Image (cartoon, helix red, strand yellow):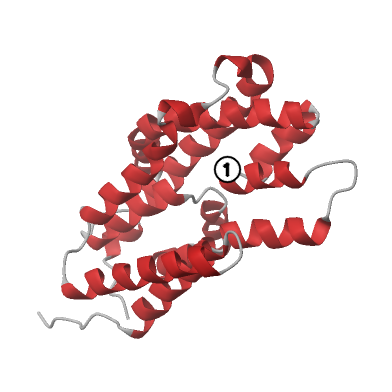
Amino acid sequence: MLSVEAGSVSLDRNLVWSGFKQLLPISLFVIVFAVAFGLAAAQTGLDATSTLLMSTLVFAGAAQFAVLDLWGPHVPVLPLVVTVFAINARHLLMGATLYPWLRELPRARRYGVMLVVSDANWAMSMQAFSNRKPGLGLLFGGGLALWSAWALGSWLGLKFGSVIQDPVSLGLDMVMGCFLLAMVLGGQKNLRMLIIWSVAAGASLLAYRYLPENAHVVTGALAGGVLGAVWTEKKHEH
């Protein structure tokens, strides 16, 4: 079982605002990809209302891009659901890793926080928790910053998306990956974490090679998550 410091579950206005400000730099890059999504959605035939509702209610960049590939006069509902679930399955494990801290919140606030959890604010909050610092402000405030940036960028893409038609050509698709790698390298460094990440990476690479598209996301997350859950850290007596 994880030990939870009393101060690490604090969630007040100041902590939320601090988390919001800390994620603003990453949010600028999120806007760029949201612009690309808004443009792609318009070119696919989605109307502005549907596009903005998708970005504000779904808030899942990779899944939203994947949905556009399946969109048309006749939407294949089952493949669409399976694709979105596969891409976002990692959120199941995010929720599991956050539970020791979120369970201290009232149920309404707990699920309110989870509505804006994404890779970046999850990684930063988990790093804060591992250092016995407050992380819920980062999780919720940072999530609000990313969510706002995604919604704003989607709207800008509908209006002015032709300015950035191909963010990949600018290397912007690597920003989030490099950010998450930095979070991993800044976290705990021990044999247990090295083995867990290696197993997750190996399983993901094998799935990418031999399993259907997007299966590597679920496979890698499950492999690392299950090993981390089974191989728990020993508590140190003080």
Dot 1 alpha-carbon crowd within 10 angstroms: few under 14, some 14 to 19, many 20 or more:
some
Q: Position of residue 146 (x, y in %)?
A: 48, 37
Q: Amino acid at mark 1?
A: Gly
- Quadrant (top left, top right, bottom left, bottom right) of the N terminus: bottom left
Q: In this rendering, is residue 212 above or below 12?
A: below
Indicate left or right for 146 with 235 as reference. right
Indicate left or right for 164 with 68 as reference. left
Q: In which image quadrant can residue 197 be found? A: bottom left
Instruction: Give the farthest residue toward the left.
Output: 238
Instruction: Give the farthest residue toward the right.
Output: 73
Q: Position of residue 44 (x, y in %)?
A: 76, 32
Does any portion of residue 103 appear in the rendered image? no
Indicate left or right for 55 with 48 as reference. left
- Residue picked out by circle 1: 61
Q: Position of residue 37 (x, y in %)?
A: 62, 32
Q: Residue at x 43, y 30 (%)?
A: 29
Q: Residue at x 65, y 38 (%)?
A: 55
In what element is the residue under mark 1? Answer: helix
Q: In this rendering, is residue 88 above or below 35?
A: below
